[in-house]
Image: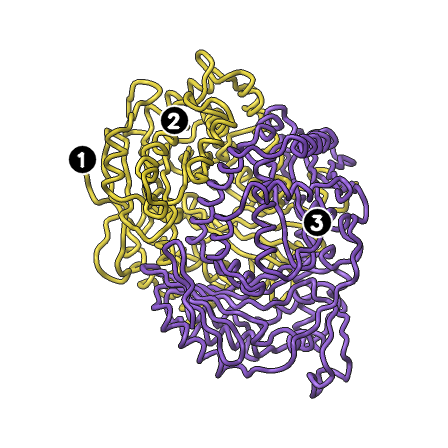
Chain colours: A purple, B yellow
Amino acid sequence: MTVLRGFGEEIAFARAANGMAVFVMAKPGYRKKFAQVTVAYGSNDVVFSLPDSEFSGNCVGPLRRFETPPGIAHFLEHKMFDRPGGSAFDDFSALGASANAFTSNDFTSYTFWTVDEFRKCLELLLDLVWNPHFSEESVRKEQGIIEQEIVMYEDEPYSRLTRALLESLYHVHPVRIDVTGTKESIRQITPELLYVCHAAFYRPFNMALFVAGDFEAEDEALRLAEILDSAAPSKGARPVRERPEEPPEPRQLSATVKMHVPRPFINIGWKDQPGGHDGKKLLRREIATDLLLNILFGKSSPVFARLYEEGLADDLGVSYEAWPDYSFATITAETVEPQKLLDEVLREVDTARKRGIAASDFERAKDAAWGHYITLFDDLDLIAESQCQLYFIGEDVFSYGETLKSITLQEVEERLSVLDPRFLAHVFLIPDTHGLNSYASSYKKEEQTRRC
Amino acid sequence: MNRTRSPEVPSSGLVQNEESFVATEIEPGVTLRWLPVRRWKTASITVVFRVPMRRETVTRLGLVPRLAARGTRELPSLTEMARFLDEHYGTRMHSSATKIGYCQILNFSVSFPTPSAIGGARARSLVKELLSFAWSCAVRPRMDGDGYPPDVFAHEKEEQRRDIEAIVNSRPEYAMVRLMEILSQGDPSGLPAWGSLSDLEHVGPIDTWEAWRNSASTSPVDVYVVGVDEDTLAAACSAHDWAFPAQRNYRPELEVKKTPPSVPDQMIEVEDRLPGSQTIVCVALHAGIDAADPRFPALLMYNGILGGFPHSRLFTEVRERASLAYFADTVINSWRGMVIATAGVRDERRKEAENLILQQARSIALGHVSEDELEKTRKGLLRRIMSQKDSPSSLIRRSLDWIVLGGPNTDEELVRMVLKVTREDVINVAQGVKPVASYVLRGIPDGVGGRDAS
């Protein structure tokens, strides 16, 4: 049992004998109680290997290497709510709780919120993640539901932009494929494949439980560690995730997507080298790059105001993703002139390389980041997500804060190297007005048809 | 100053340890609402003007939050504002025009780490400086003579136009806007919070400032403060200049509740076509029960059974059983007294989805409501009501809803009323429900689209 402390907050940490991590964050006075189970399994884990001895019974043959259809981690997340008597959503509702789940490139998480019956809800959550129940019929039905989820994202400009950029940046890395998979790939998913993936990744040592609410954190962490231990035995070896060898350069410099939107969008990305498995280095790299991007293109930068006032960029946003096996920086905006905005961004990067970063800009960006970090502790979903993800690289939410405090101007300046034109790709999403006059005119029409 | 603990006053009972906003009238029509709760690390100051929707002002006032974000008299540029916020621990500024019932809600807010989380000398001046900033955003924008700077105004007007047009980028949101437009049948109180695109073409920097100056000076104002201790707040308030852009002339009659647009005599069915992959089906079910109606808790239960939860009919029937949709749910419009059902489906199955929605509404009206779904819904509603206590923004929203729309004025009262709702109450509500409009935004392949009336 360890108590992680910092900035007036405490998180008790225990590890169950079966290897599963437990975090309990005390939130005195909160009505809600929250729990999240995170599995270190995401959409990128499509190819993996396990020793033959790991599998027995009817689900799998003697295969050691598995090539699974893209989207299967997300599909599995949906199907984990199936229970022999019906849906786990129903069971959570019967306890007055609200449940949800989400899948990313690297993780799958299951959550519930409740004000009552916390223990029963937790038992239900653990039962859900450890006792899968799939049938041919339910898998077939889910294909229709997820197909609608896929097309919903196809209709969203930012989803299309992200997808097109990752497809441009990456040659073969699975991050280039959408978390949901494709309409074609999800049709290849069977109950047998789902059982294989569950057995491979939903193992206690590959999972973490985060709980927050009005608890005595240390006592609760110990109790939960006991419950976890009795709920699932420790078993098996770690699945070996296979990643194809990815060249350092982007696959292509540019891409254009046509879509029925009123004005263009742009997504500019720089492919960074993978962050590696040293959690401390990964964290420093992430924080320094975030600070850099905010100094150069954040709201308090002169270039942000100029681009906005000239009508060149609206909703300009920056981000940096740092993961052990892939990393990239992006700048996204709505713009009337994508090429001009791209030129302006590259010119600004070039200027920054020559002039460096002003100490006053660095200090201001750090102050702002510090304030944002402090307020993060009110967002239990985000804290849970951050803590569970940091745990798998050997860090925690408090070491994040300490790292932020210790970042230097020099580290930030060094990160200018990530904005290297050799690793750049960009996507223009441009309006396809074929068949339409314009949204402005069509929007104003008062066309209605009374069919009855 | 006239200080009261109302209207959100708590008492002991089913909702334990209830905290509520402490209301203090600073001057007629200006109310400070302070939440004496210290469990959060985020503090906020939210200045809200409640302005009745009027055709002649709504489009102009819809621009005001954008213009506020362009600069104040003290910080007249984007960069100066942004640097001020960064230097105050990354304070986030938010300004928006939204709508609650018949009111346009002009919101100017800042959120920042609580002084107690920061500590030190700077923390003490933080609240005072940010109260002044939020107030300036609202009433002391950057000006040029008698109006907004023409270049800034022209730019923000253009951005507003583009943002309105860009609603089509979210098909479900666009479908909801269109449905409301159809239901309102030209009634200005049914306009969205930004007003209308055609009116936007005719607004200018001077008349917009004039409209805002008059509205700000006559409208009720609420200043919500969360995460700040009483002494710090008192010091900030006593040092603050509560000046308005014109002589304050509060008009209490602006607070009189207005009725929603009348519902159509017969079911309206409208289809639009918009290139895209998914078809959105919306159905408006009119119950004639608004937030102030004693039957409102039964309507909450009805909505919950039909589509408000994952155990609800639309989730289980439209999504899970028929495998038709990824989302299929309902929301209440508590001013119009309506339940709106929405689902995203394959185009060729749109009619099936619409029929299923109507079929489930009829099924409840016929009395097919199980004890199991009734109790699941009741528990879900109680959790939602009580969970709001952990979210300052939910508490502010709930307070504003109550002020504008009425209804149970404490969570305790609402909980008590939900607990009393019977199966018969729900069925009675369902029997009074009338489908009044269906709107289908058809997803069609690229290149063959266009909004048409086929």
Residue A179: which quarter of the image? bottom right
Q: Chain of mark 1?
A: B
Considering only order in the chain, which callout, 1 or 2, is on the residue closer to the N terminus? 1
Residue occupying the point 32% across, 31% down: B220
Furthest residue to the left?
B2
- The label number, if any, that marks residue B387 in the structure image: none
Mark 2 vs mark 1: give the one in front.
Answer: 2
* Along the line of sight, the residue nearer the viewer: A410 or A88: A410
**Residue that badge 2 annotates:** B136
Whether residues under marks 2 and 1 lie with C-beta atoms below 8 angstroms apart, the answer is no
Q: Which amino acid lies under the numbered mark 1 shown in the image of this protein?
A: Asn
Residue occupying the point 78% across, 80% down: A63
Residue B96 spot, x, y in % from top left: 46, 35
Q: Is residue A171 above or below residue A3?
A: above
Mark 3 vs mark 1: give the one in front.
Answer: 3
Q: Quadrant of the C terminus of chain A?
A: top right
- The label number, if any, that marks residue B2 in the structure image: 1
Whether residues under marks 3 and 1 lie with C-beta atoms below 8 angstroms apart, the answer is no
- The label number, if any, that marks residue A272 in the structure image: 3
Residue A261: which quarter of the image? top right
On whether disc 3 and disc 2 are found on a single subunit, the reply is: no
User: Is residue A205 visible to the viewer in this orientation of the structure?
Assistant: yes
Kind of element beneath mark 2: helix
